[in-house]
Image (spheres, helix red, strand yellow):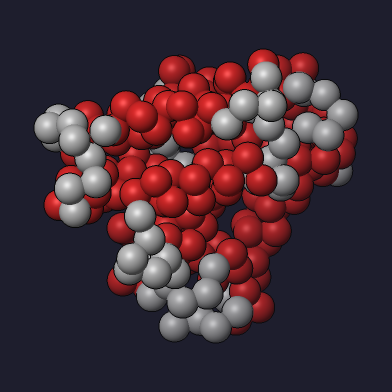
Amino acid sequence: MYESLESFPLRKINFVKTRTTILKAVSHLLKEKDFSSITVDEICSRAQISRGTFFNYFSTKDHVFHYFLRIFTIRIALRMKQWPEDLSFEEKIREIYKWFNEETQYSRFVDSYISFLLGVGEENNEMKLIDAEFVYFFNGIEEEEYAYYNNLTLHNLFEKICKTAQGNNEVALKDDAKELANLFTGVLIASYVTDQMNGSIDHLAVFDKIWK
């Protein structure tokens, strides 16, 4: 079990450094313009790499977000593990909504997530982390858990939350957990969109009523 990135072979260290350098370049560019306006050439210039190097690590520009989404999903899962057992369903929704909106490493994260859901779908995210990246980004994940986290989706996490809520009689809807997870995603996205139009209203509270 490796304890730090420096413990890995140089090849893997360079792999992690290059992927994270590209991610950081995109993150900086997102502070200046929308993702759709960013070009691969601009990313390469900011990261100080060649186009060939970029495409050795990411098949398309969009795959940079897919990579970040993998990291983000694991972070959410680890945060959820820290929840107190008595946290209510509504409180869980609010926590996740806050995490989505407070994400600063990837500007306008929810916008990109919506586009990703409509165009790709979480189950089709082919970006996986190598062992060195698990050690670099996270603490406390065992090697035997890598495959689980590399296939985990936010939808999986939402299913688990909804299933628990049904068991606690916090949700009146009788749909299966998978469909409730779809609604969970819809509530988050609808709240985000309406908040962009009018931030003076607690839209999440409005949409939360669908569960009753």
Residue 109 is left or right of residue 43, and the answer is left
Q: Nearer the viewer, residue 146 or 53?
A: 146
Is the C terminus in the top left, top right, bottom left or bottom right quadrant?
Answer: top left
Estimate the x, y position of residue 99 in percent, counting from the top left: 57, 48
Residue at 39% of width from left, 69% of height from top? 84
Residue at 63% of width from left, 59% of height from top? 16
Estimate the x, y position of residue 175 in percent, counting from the top left: 14, 30
Residue 176 is left or right of residue 147, and the answer is left
Q: How many marks?
A: 0
Estimate the x, y position of residue 54 in percent, counting from the top left: 69, 37
Q: Nearer the viewer, residue 121 or 181?
A: 181
Residue at 65% of width from left, 45% of height from top? 103
Estimate the x, y position of residue 155 in percent, counting from the top left: 34, 39
Residue at 63% of width from left, 35% of height from top? 109
- Which of the 4 image quadrants contains residue 43? top right
74 in relation to 41, above or below: below
Residue 180 in view here: yes
24 in relation to 40, above or below: below
Residue 185 in view here: no
Residue 50 is left or right of residue 97, and the answer is right
Is the N terminus in the top left, top right, bottom left or bottom right quadrant?
Answer: bottom left
